[in-house]
Image (tube, coloured by chain):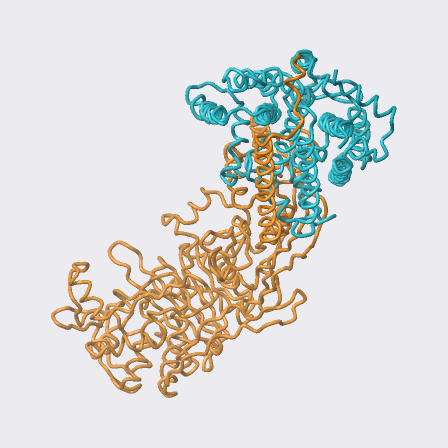
Chain colours: A cyan, B orange
Amino acid sequence: MNTTLGSTVKDFREPHPRRGLWFDPLLLLAAVGLIACGAFVVGGATADDIPGDRLYYAYRQIAYGVVGIVLMMLLSRFDYSRAREWKAGLYATMIGFILLVFAIGASARGSKRSIDFGFINLQSSELGKVLLILALAGFVVDRVRRLNEPETTSRVMLLALLPAMLVVAQPDLGSGMVYLAIALAVLFVAGTKWTHFAALGVLAVGAVLLVLVAAPKAGVQVLKPYQTDRLTAFLHPTDNPKKQGYQINQSLTAIGSGGKTGRGDQATQTKLNFLPEHHTDFIFSVVGEEYGFVGAALVLSLFALLIWRALRILTMSKNLFGALVAGGVTAMLMFQVFVNVGMTIGIMPITGVPLPLISYGGSSVLVTFMALGLLQAIYAQARETARAKGL
Amino acid sequence: MYLDSDRRPTLTPKLALRIAVIGGIALVAFAVIFFRLWYLQVLSGDKYLAEARNNQQRRILVQAPRGEVVDRDGRVLIENRTGLAVKVTPDKLPRDPLKRQALYRRLGRVLGMRPRRIERGIAKELKALPFSTATVKQDVSGQVVAYILERQEQFPGVTVERVFLRRYPHQTIGAHLFGTVGEVTKEELHDTRYRGVNLGDRVGQSGIEQEYDRFLRGKDGASKVQVDALGRLKRELTVVQPRQGSQLRLSIDIDTQKAGQRALAGGTGRGAFVVMNVHNGEVVALGSQPSFDPNIFSKVIKESDFKRLSDPNLGNPLSNRATQGLYPTGSTFKLITATAGLQTGVFTPDTVLFDGGSLTVGGVTFKNAGGGGHGALALRQALTVSSDVFFYQLGRDMNGSLKLQHWAKLLGLGRRTGVDLPGELPGLIPTPRWRNRLFKKHQTDRPWSVGDNINLSVGQGDLQANPLQLAVAYATVANGGKVLAPRIGQRIEDSSGRAVQELDAPPARHLNIRPEFRQAILEGLRGAASQPGGTSAKVFAGFPIPVAGKTGTAEKGAGRPDQSWYVALAPFPSPKYVVAVTDEAGGFGADTAAPMARSILAQLFGVKGDKARRGGPSD
């Protein structure tokens, strides 16, 4: 039995003279740096939002961050490989949570996305991201010898598509797209043939055309009209400056006006609420306006560090399951960062994807830290295994 | 067993490639974001900064009151009053269209306006000037305002604001002179003369209000405020106080103006008068009948009111007959004929011509207006008794040479006088060329003939002139040859009456009128107003100021009553003022216009208790 538990136990018995850290310090540094930046920016942006409580959002974000970091550290000690056996349970839990939202969800602005747990409104679609990574990695590992069969690819994509459709119906279009990105990344890292991806690409293009062009013509609304408008508004923001283009234009104005070093207290786009969703989806615009190119570059550097470490851990993983989980987590982070930042700078559609660790929101922060905790676990166990082999 | 499949001790080249692809994607994405940020923040930063500033700043205009207008003695002619205007703040109106409709209906009931009109008006104003408030109705009574303010919850977004409205305390007196104000038009906004005027501002649209608008209009104030995304005011950034327009002093004497309009009103109801200083062209009074009350223009004028005021059947009250009237002048023209004849050597003051009661030229007989003949007479007597035949002969002799037309033009007819009032019309001096051209175009039945010149010599026929032009011509003779541009505006003052800028008249043209000619003409006119047989002698009998004057009776064609004219110069022999009066249907000059001139002169010279009397039917 070559279990990781065994090697860990062995290590504790015979302490290694060059015993390394049981977590990746650079990954931790990036995560802590990002959550700190995030809390700071959220605090600044929301100072006038709640009368009499200037730090309402900042305190909460810091609290989520602290809880998240603890969660990450706990998970880093967890033998992640065991999750492979729980894949069906994890998948069922995910679907259950998402369906639960429909039943008892707290609604915010016409969409039901979260379950009220008192101290936190848990967004099931956020939790679903990390559950889906584990479940899909488990499914793919089981069928790793049949990867060349189109059936494997189809099954994995359908497994992702089911929760994706459910969250799109909440409606949370952004998370749905994250699910698909995760599935693609897991398949990609597992080694699925390029032809399968090509076929998926054709299917995707067809689906987009169907949803955005053909279906509305036929009178079937797959997406709510505002979702379609938001998705396509970035292509022509000035067409409709009062509505969909408004958010993009305000965001561009905010970021652009930040200039090289930012406007600080003069950041009127943020302070006077011209910027919509300034502490959640458009937090990066706040960074751009208040701290300019320098601030935006700092945040992006931290994300680059984070993604680099995620990819590095992916290469280190002691087993395929770990590699697939790391691939899924990397895809989740990359997709959210690029889509969110791209949206604020007008090169991506508006999809309501949060910027990990920067956007305000307990669910997103906690789930991101859980994902990072998995990466830490993969790292730690890879190091243990390497040492056990005498490397 | 499945654990075996999960073992992956080394990084396979295939996996390495795939990870490299993911890393590559990340690299490209970061590069795109980086360059996009560089473009937005470093290269276009200034543009977006300006946009951000623009976003949060709103200009709120503060209306500047117009300057006051006073007469030569500083008495107020035009002032401002504050009115209450009902406005709406668009951000605070109910968003629900149905609730908004209901609000417009309530507002319409209170203000006596149709809801549709309120809605359209607001939409129009906001289109022009977004984010500002829109005026629903100007000058609302205090009761209505109190009603609205007491029920603010029923009228969300409705506010009451104090606005300056123009007030003309003398109402119909001097209406044509003072003119009107109205909302600035689109064309005016594009005109450089209206630089700094904002849409919705009221500017002068006629009369002095228009002519001196650049002095009278103030400079609107503006406060720059910071607003948030919902349009709520956050703080005031800068405030520029409004500046009232300058005070304008006119050469008008309001008492003379009143006397003139009273005199006119006593006639047939359509006419005009001018009182002018013959030495410097200062207009002391100038009026037109029928008149109107310019106060109705100080708020938004009703369509029906405007229609009534420009209805020709009602005498087109808005037109200023003193500068826009186009009339034959009758015998008052004889001064011009005499000057032309003398100056060009056609005759001398002592040339004696025979007036047998009629003159036949080319088979057409021209009769004296009175019918009978005056016998042999020279210029003075001819003017005194207004012998038509005497002047017919001058007209006949000057035909073909254009001497008469030339001198009429020199004396200011057929061209604008240059008075500081907008809309002045040049009128017409008939010439052979003019008539022959019309004839060629079949717009008249016959070409020019000597008869036309004969008609012109006594101010009948195709001649078109107005009282102001006649006043200028008479003043030119009286002052020895200065063709003056009449002036109404005297100087620009600050609010305490201190002069800021004198409004100088443009330089006058000089004609070399020989003193003996001037004297002969003046004596002839004096005789007319004083000697037995003089056309207006009866009218001026007992008048303490020596007046020289000429009656005129212009024939208006079949079935229409004659137009009555009188031009007076006083005091004789060194006249200071010229008074020109006409009544469109007043008949003989001595019947209507001359008594009017007497009342005006009485006021002008402070003759107390003077009672104007009618002259006989002589011309």
Report x, y in % for residue B515: 39, 87
Q: Is residue B241 above or below residue B461?
A: above
Relative depth, front residue between A219 and A145: A145
Relative depth, front residue between A256 and B21: B21
Rendering quarter of residue B370: bottom left
Q: Residue at x 28, y 86 (%)?
A: B348
Relative depth, front residue between A137 and B259: A137
Left or right for B577, reference B382: right
* The C terminus of chain B sits in image quarter: bottom left
Rendering quarter of residue B13: top right
Q: Is residue A295 above or below residue B437?
A: above
Report x, y in % for residue B467: 39, 66
Number of dots carrying numbers: 0
One can see residue B99 in this view? no
Report x, y in % for residue B530: 41, 76
* The N terminus of chain B sits in image quarter: top right
Left or right for A288, reference B538: right
Relative depth, front residue between A171 and A337: A337
